[in-house]
Amino acid sequence: MRLASIHLYPVKSLGGVDVVEAQVEPWGLRGDRRWLALNPDGTYLTARTEHRMLSITAAPRADGGLQLTAPDGDTLLVAPPHDGEPAATTMTRLDKVLLAGEQADEWLSSRLGRPLRLGWLDDPRRRSVALDHGGKPGDLLNLSDAGPLLLATTASLRRLNDWIAEGAVERGEELPEPLPMARFRPSVVVDGVGEPFVEDDWKRVRIGAAEFRFTEQCDRCALTLIDTRTFTSGREPIRTLARHRQWDGKTWFAVRLVPVGDPAVIRVGDPVSVD
């Protein structure tokens, strides 16, 4: 097995970037999910509510800042606001973030047509993985929903796309295009897995020199229904996952991991081994 791709999503629910290597930190990949868009009341905005968020690309910068790129190509560089104004947030297990400032707020608000503020998690050690999501004392977390890393396999995506195609044939519908992995926003994708969904039973994962502990399978939400090209919602993959991968009232695809051991860099092409 090998590491097929690495994906960073610096701003929660914005588009992200593919990279060839990434530093693994205790709370996730460096540059991943450290920012979020806040509504005026302190709630955070996601693409489940505002699909156009996926049309804006966020790329990490070496200083911990961002480059935001709108669909028309307009860009904005944002520095990490170490002395930024604190703002309360409804993010679970986190009381506040630091605001990036008026320029970033105005840029983001104008692109999405609603008043927004851009917030930054200055210290991920202030947030932890919840115990009911497989966390242990000392497990740290960026702004991901429940786990520092999300791992998916190409074998599982192929099987899911086969199931979707089979369902379309049964219903007499035109065969849809295969879903891209981007629908699931994984941190890392593994290729060369013999069977689909064997990752459900992995306990430990080693990617190159980095080690991870399995915490839980990932339950999927309506965000996966949004086409990342047209930003419209359909019925897949939740319809098909509900048929083949539903239990405990939820649908499941990919697994969450927590880094363990010493910090390390992972690279596309690294060998992957599991226990």
Image: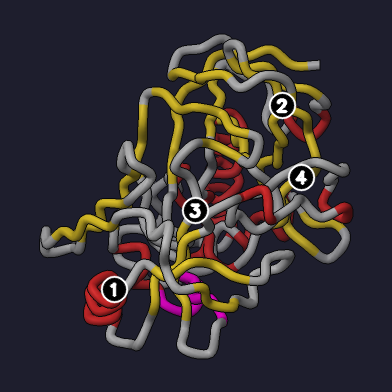
Instruction: Tell me the distance, in whole angstroms, between the alpha carbons under discs 4 and 3.
Output: 23 Å
Q: Nearer the viewer, mark 3 or mark 2?
A: 3
Q: Vertically, is 196 above or below 236?
A: above
Q: Of the numbered discs in the image, which one, if any, rests on residue 217? A: 4
| Disc 1 and disc 3 in contact, CB within 8 angstroms | no
Name which of mark 1 and mark 3 comes first in the sequence: 3
Image x and y of residue 245, in percent: 75, 50
Image x and y of residue 160, in percent: 59, 43
Instruction: Tell me the distance, in whole angstroms, between the alpha carbons under discs 4 and 2.
Output: 14 Å
Specify the amino acid type for callout 3. Answer: Arg
Is 49 in the magenta? yes
| Disc 4 and disc 2 in contact, CB within 8 angstroms | no
Q: Nearer the viewer, mark 4 or mark 3?
A: 3
Image: magenta residue range:
43-50
Name which of mark 4 and mark 2 comes first in the sequence: 2
Instruction: Tell me the distance, in whole angstroms, between the alpha carbons under discs 1 and 4.
Output: 33 Å
Q: Which quarter shows the C terminus?
A: top right
Query: What residue is at 47 percent from the left and 77 percent from the top?
Result: 38
Name which of mark 1 and mark 4 comes first in the sequence: 1
Front residue (pair 25, 160): 25
**Label 2 secondary element:** strand
Q: Which residue is mark 2?
A: 212
Specify the amino acid type for callout 2. Answer: Phe
Q: Of the numbered discs in the image, which one, if any, rests on residue 35? A: none
Image x and y of residue 233, in percent: 44, 71
Horizontal placement of 107 versus 73: left or right? right
Q: Vertically, is 234 above or below 162?
A: below
Q: Of the numbered discs in the image, which one, if any, rests on residue 34? A: 3
Residue 114 position by quadrant: bottom left
Q: Residues within 10 Å of mark 4 (few under 14, many from 20)?
A: many
**Label 4 secondary element:** strand
Q: Which residue is mark 1?
A: 108
